[in-house]
Every structure is written in structure tokens, then in C-alpha cells.
Image (tube, rainbow, N blue to C red):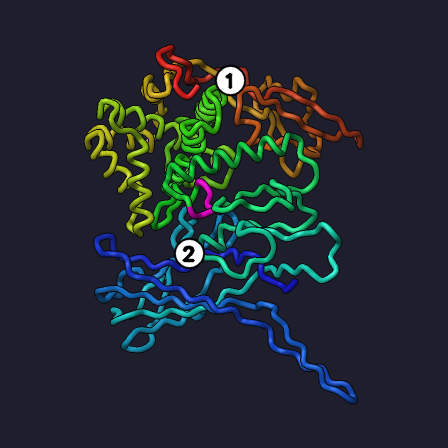
Amino acid sequence: MAPTTLPLLLTFLTSIFTLTTALPRITVTLAVELSPTHNTTTTTTTTTTTTTNITALAITLNLTHPHPIPSHTPLLQLDLNHGLTPTQQYSDSALAASDTLGPLILTHTDTNASDARRTWTAHRDTQGPVVVRFRAVPRVVWVLPEGIPAGVRGVSSLGDGVREVAVGRPERVLAKSYFAVGELKRWPGWDVELGEGERPFYVYWIGELPYDSERVSGIAKEMHGAISSFFGDDTSPFRAIHEYALMSPVRQYDLWYREGVAQFYAIVAPFAAGAVDRSYFVQWLNNNAQSYYTGGMAGKTWQSVIDNYWTSVPNVKAPYGVGFAYLAQVQGLIAQATNGTKDVDDLVLELYRRFTAHEQVQTDEFLEVLSGLVGTEAAEASLSAMLNGTLVVPPTDCFAKFGLRMVRKDGELFDIGFVSAQQKIVRFTSNSTRAEEAGLRVGDEIVRMWGAWGVSDSLDNMMRVVAQRDGREFTVEYWPRSYEKVENWVWEDDGSVTAHS
């Protein structure tokens, strides 16, 4: 099997312009650069060896805009990080730009760490189409050699095996893809062929799963289909929920919407389509609600969350919780303002329509559409309260269409119970913690433990820690909650309907 490249882990340069002008037409051309042909010479013969090893991608951006782009206006931008992973942070000399008047000299500025973005401007106003050329060099080369053991396979988000052709926007096809190689298992089985017109949906894993893979994979397929159908996408087999919640140009500031929509519709769309039952739906709603109310971040301003985003698990998780709770609140506000004729679906689908039309979609556009549904005063008040850290409490009847009402039921604050440094417990979070009561002590070495992200997803989850003391390993299990209760809201049946039951 020929060598190929792993994802380049880059965010492709994207053109941006003033907010009052139309976006340009952008054509992207990718050309692979191959390692040179090698000649091997012996005393009697010369052997030519041809290789298909990809060494880089040569990228050409052709930007066509109806008007000249002023020199003070951003021409190109690049996110400097993809999550915690640095992108290929191109220098000015790495980009070759020109227009009909000749070469363009590009200079860049970097924004602060919370935005982590590089923006280029040209030394003069542009004239005619702009062409930008640069190279993307892979950081890792993935090679599946000849003679690999039976059962070893390579797959990616693009499908089974090595895919050399994929259609889509490069920054989403490449940067959003996952790759795996090994003794992979697949659902449905490797010998199962797709039926005519059936959309591909596969689940891959290595080893033995601790749950029923057949059942979980089937549910995942139903949920994927339900979410795709809601957004009117019946053609893209590899799209994930986040692809429907994107804003553009991308900013860290809009994470509350992107993650909130992902959480909200991962719950609501499958139930509305009949992919999951009512008890599962209500449990999932309440798990997400308590994650927001008891997670320790309720009451934090949105700017403080963004400024400290990568400093702790609660900060990273905050956009999911606050976004979900706020969209539930917006659901109620819209239903009340329109007498139930419209809901948050209308808002989200309109923003998605704008995104697919390559229009700007950010928090300001969210506010604009919401204002058209509930009025400017109510829209601005709700958004401002959320951003300022006011506890988000949806209207009691926000999910009345599902026969649910919201009631207050205070819950214990999430608390692992200890603080660790260099894999050792250095202190407990209070004078009385369930972690210490379970047997952990200052100085214990943490060998492994459940992730804080997942264990806080439900009030029923237990924490398991494997620790070492005096050379001996031991396991403790405890409820990762403090003795302090905080305001918590849950949904329960209102007794009015049994729809979708």
C-alpha cells in the first residue's frame, strides 16, 4: 500500500474582509509534491526506483473580489492553534502573494492568546484577483508497509483504507479528520456491503468494548441520521454535529453557541425523530442541566471563561453547559413570544443557512435573528445576562411541546476532592471531602483515575482512583460531590401529553 500523509493539522488560510462587504470567491488548488525519483547504480546496471511518497502540499488560493481590498483591511487569517495543537504558523516569507499589478508584500499581526489568530494585510490596495501560494508540510507520515499482519487495517473519517480523493473544503476535510491503524474491528462487519442508496456509517474500535457494540452502534447510527435530517443534510456521510453549529469567521468568543448547539441537538433531534425513547431523553436533558448548575462554573462571566479556557477542565467544559442551558432558555422565550408557532429550531436553521451561504455568522448575527423572534429588548437582555454570568434558568414551560416542565431540585456541587501536582495529591479541597473519607491521603501517587470530564456528566457517576502509597497500589471509589448543595433545575413530566413516548 502506498504511503500517504496523516492530517496536516493546519487550519487553511481563509480570506476575510470588512463586515459590510460581500465575501470573495475563493478557489483552492492543492498539488502534491512527491519525493524525487531515485537512481540506483551497480557495476552492470542502473535501476530507477519511482516513489509516491508525498512530501508536501503546494497550495494556491485564488481570491476574486468585485472591489479592491484596502491595504488596512485584513486579507488573510490563520488560527494559530487547533485546540491545543499549533497549526503550521506560516511566516510572511512563506506566503507568496500577487495581483494584476504584481507582487504583494504581506505583513502579519497576532492577536492575544485567547483568540490566537494571525492576520495579514497587504502593503497596498489590491487590484484584480489575488493569488497566494504556500506549502503545507506534514508533521507525520503514515506508512502501511507491505507484509503487514493479517487483520491490520487503516481507516479515517473519510472511509476505509487510504483515500486519495475527497470532496469538500480543505480546512474541514483535512483538519477535522481522524485516522487509525491497527487490528481494527468495524460495525457493521468488514464483510457487510452497503445497500443501494444507503449512506455509509461505520464504527471502528480496537480490542474488546465494555458495552454492547451492536446496540450502541445502532443507536449512534439512528442519532446521526436524525441530526443530519434535521439540518437537511442527506449527502455527507462524515459530517458531525459540530459542522452544523459552526460560526464564521471562527472566534473563541462564539464557543458558547458552537458547543451549545452540539449539546442541544445531540439530545433533542434524536428524540424528536424517534431514535431514542422518552426516559433516555429526559435523563440526558437533566444530565446536561446538572453539569451546568453543579459544575462549578455557573456565575462566571463569559469573558473570564474564554480568558482562562485551557487552564482547567471546568473552564473547557463551561461552553457546553452554558450554551445548552441558554439555548433551552431561548427555546422558551421564542415559544412564548410566538405563541408556540416558532422555537429555537427556526433560529438555529437560519444561522446554518447563512453559514452555508458563506455569510458572516457570529454572536451579533445570533442576536439579530433572536431579536426578530422575541423583540430586541428581550433578546439583548437574555444574551447580556448569560454573558455577564447570571445563572441561566429556562422558562418552566420551555419544553412544553415535549410534555415537560422545569422544577428546582438542588444538587451537590461537583468536587473531585483533591488537588494534584506531578501525579501526587498535594491537598484536599476542603476540611471534609469524600475523597479523603474514601481513603486517599496527601502524598499518594495517582496511578490512574476516571476523567473529570466524564465523571461530572451525571449526579449518579462515581469516581474511581487507583493510587500508590509506600509502593503498594490500591483502589478507592467515591461520589465526586461536595457536601454543599447548589441551585439545580431539572425537567419532569407535566402530565399534559405523552408525545414521543
| Crowd tier of the residue under label 1, counting other residues whose Cα lies within 10 Å: few below 14, some 14–19, many 20 or above | some
Q: Quadrant of the N terminus?
A: bottom right
Q: Is residue 24 visible?
A: yes
Residue 498 located left or right of residue 457: left
Name above or below for residue 127 compared with residue 212: below
Which residue occupies 48% across, 69% down?
A: 31
Q: What is the distance, in whole Å, between disc 2 and disc 1 at their CAs?
A: 45 Å
The residue closer to the viewer here, 388 or 279, is 279
Residue 162 located left or right of residue 360: right
Is residue 239 part of the magenta span, yes or no? yes
- Segment colored magenta: 235-241
Q: Specify which label sits upstream in the sequence, 2 or 1.
A: 2
Which residue occupies 41% across, 70% down?
A: 133
Q: Residue furthest front?
A: 196
Q: Residue flagged by tag 2: what amino acid is it?
A: Arg
Residue 169's disc number? 2
**Residue position for label 1:** 412
Residue 177's disc number? none
Q: Main secondary structure of the magenta part?
A: loop
Q: Quadrant of the C terminus?
A: top left
Residue 285 located left or right of residue 441: left
Residue 461 located left or right of residue 245: right
Q: Position of residue 388 (x, y in %)?
A: 33, 31
| Crowd tier of the residue under label 2, counting other residues whose Cα lies within 10 Å: few below 14, some 14–19, many 20 or above | few
Q: Residue furthest top?
A: 495
Which residue occupies 70% across, 47% down?
A: 183
Image quadrant in which you'd find residue 161: bottom right
Image quadrant in which you'd find residue 96: bottom left
